[in-house]
Every structure is written in C-alpha cells, then in structure tokens.
Image (cartoon, grey):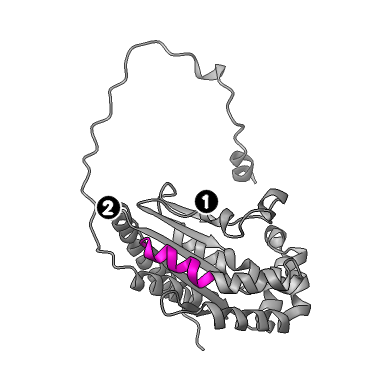
C-alpha cells in the first residue's frame, strides 16, 4: 500500500481538523453528547489519532479520559461505575483512550479478573451500551488493528528514543508473548459486543498516517453535524496607555534569556 505523501497528509489532516471544529460547534449548540472509544493492540496508534482530533478543539467541551488502574475502592464498585462518572453532559464530547473494554482485553489475558467476572461483563456490555444510546448518547467504538511485526517495530522505536520511552510499559512488553491470547480475547469480545446498535469499526493501523485520516474521516461521517461558519468578530482598538505610574521592569523576576545562548552559538 502506497503511503500518502507528507504534504498531502498534512493538508488533508488540516481540512479534517477544520471539520472537527464544525462538529464541536454543532455538539455545543444542539446539546448533543458524543462518546468515542479507542481500543486496540498496544502501540497501534490510538494516542496519535486522539492527539490529532483534539489538537485544535476547545478542551472545555472535548475531554480525553485515560484512566489508570483501579484503586482498591474502585475494585469493590460496580465495574462500569468508574467509567459512568466520566460520561459527557449536554454539549460535550468524551474520548476514551481505552475504556470499559479493559475487562475483555488486558484484564482477561493477564488474569486480573476471574472467568466469572469476564463472562458477566460480556453479557452486560450490550445492555449497558444500549442504555447509553437510548438516553441519547452517540457512541462510537474503534478498534485499531496492527500486525505483530509492526507492533514490535514500534516498541523498539519507543525503547530507542528517550522522549518516547514513557510510552513503553512492562505490560506492553508482556503482551509480546501473548499475541495469540490477545487475538482470542479480541475475537470473543467482538462476538458478544459487535452489535447492530453499537458496532465496532476496525481501523487498519499498519500505517499511522492512513489510520489517522481514515478514523477521523469516518468519525465525522457518522455524526450528523452541520457546518456552521463562526460569526465574525470585530477586535476593538487597543486601549491607549495611561499615565498611572507602574513599577520598574527591573524589579520583576524575569526568566533568563536562554535563547540568546543559542543565537551566540
């Protein structure tokens, strides 16, 4: 598969990000509620897509939820409880960077839940998601698919680059020896939760540029927003300086001009 040239990719991404602004404005003006779940293999590129989606959106109405492992208290709660508290209110969009499907993935494969808890989860999910939909929430679910070879290459890149090393966790490395187990868990999850009301959409994430464009384009196509040009704003003239005395600038604690050392070099 030929890769989209960088300039064409950036141009199309910019166009889609403008459309995301229109979508956000529509959500705010209509009071809609949108939930988007991002699931898939470790290093499949979920975070990269989320980053491009939110890059120019208003963080007051678009939130990313990436929950850490549950606390002792949360382990004693109804499983969905910690996720319900993060659902959107009127006029909001919530993007889950991993979601309640942790129970069908990492918890199942790594033995963090019992067989009974896993089976109960698979039975409950369709009803839980139907309740969200019946209440008016728009729910979208994306699974990012990547090959074992590409996943391993991305893990290696994270290990080699200091600014990406934080992305590589012991749990990620452990997944390399459990490729088949994760595949089986994903297939079982799809069999129970890929419903007509709440389908899974699979993103081919072998190429990150393609995955980002494909996912954002598809998301926009599923939301019935109307493009609305923002009202033009008139910037008032700058206030003229007053004669009131102000403290001298040299009394302030200025950040040292580090950039000057770069210019000197």
Q: Can residue 245 be seen at all in this image of the molecule?
A: yes
Q: Quadrant of residue 240?
A: top left
Rendered location of residue 100, percent (x, y): 58, 64
> In which image quadrant can residue 167 be found?
bottom right
Number of the front mark, 2 or 1: 1
Which quadrant of the figure has residue 197? bottom left
- Give the residue pinned by disc 2: 29
Position of residue 147 relative to residue 43, above or below, is below
Q: Residue at x 69, y 48 (%)?
A: 73
Tell how many labels: 2
Q: Between marks 2 and 1, how big is the CA–CA gap?
A: 23 Å
Element assignment for label 1 = loop
Determine which residue is flagged by label 1: 85
- Residue shown at 23% from the left, 33% from the top: 236
Residue at 75% across, 71% down: 110
Q: Residue at x 24, y 52 (%)?
A: 230
Range covered by the magenta-colored residues: 125-136
Q: Nearer the viewer, residue 179 or 22?
A: 179
> Upstream in the sequence, badge 2 or badge 1?
2
* Residue 258 higher or lower than 15, as above or below: above
Position of 217 compared to 252: left or right?
left
Q: Residues within 10 Å of mark 1 (few under 14, many from 20)?
A: few
- Tell me the crowding category of disc 2: few under 14, some 14 to 19, or many 20 or more residues within 10 angstroms, Cα based: few
On screen, residue 27 versus residue 164, left or right, reads left
**Residue 261 on image: x %, y %:** 64, 41
């Amino acid at each position: 598969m030929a890769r989209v040239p960088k300039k064409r990719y950036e141009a199309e991404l910019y166009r889609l990000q403008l459309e995301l602004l229109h979508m956000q404005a529509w959500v705010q003006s209509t009071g809609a509620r949108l939930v988007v779940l991002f699931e898939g293999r470790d290093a499949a590129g979920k975070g990269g897509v989320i980053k491009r989606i939110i890059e120019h959106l208003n963080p007051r109405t678009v939130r990313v939820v990436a929950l850490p492992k549950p606390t002792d208290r949360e382990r004693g709660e109804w499983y969905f409880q910690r996720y319900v508290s993060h659902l959107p209110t009127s006029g909001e969009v919530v993007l889950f960077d991993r979601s309640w499907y942790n129970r069908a993935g990492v918890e199942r494969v790594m033995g963090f839940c019992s067989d009974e808890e896993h089976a109960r989860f698979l039975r409950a999910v369709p009803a839980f998601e139907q309740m969200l939909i019946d209440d008016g929430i728009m729910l979208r679910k994306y699974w990012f698919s990547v090959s074992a070879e590409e996943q391993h290459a991305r893990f290696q890149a994270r290990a080699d680059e200091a600014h990406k090393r934080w992305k590589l966790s012991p749990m990620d490395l452990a997944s390399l020896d459990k490729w088949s187990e994760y595949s089986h868990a994903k297939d079982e999850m799809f069999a129970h939760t890929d419903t007509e009301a709440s389908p899974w959409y699979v993103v081919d994430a072998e190429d990150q540029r393609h995955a980002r464009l494909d996912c954002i384009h598809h998301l926009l196509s599923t939301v019935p927003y109307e493009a609305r040009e923002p009202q033009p704003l008139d910037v008032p003239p700058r206030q003229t300086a007053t004669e009131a005395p102000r403290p001298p600038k040299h009394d302030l604690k200025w950040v040292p001009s580090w950039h000057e050392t770069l210019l000197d070099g």
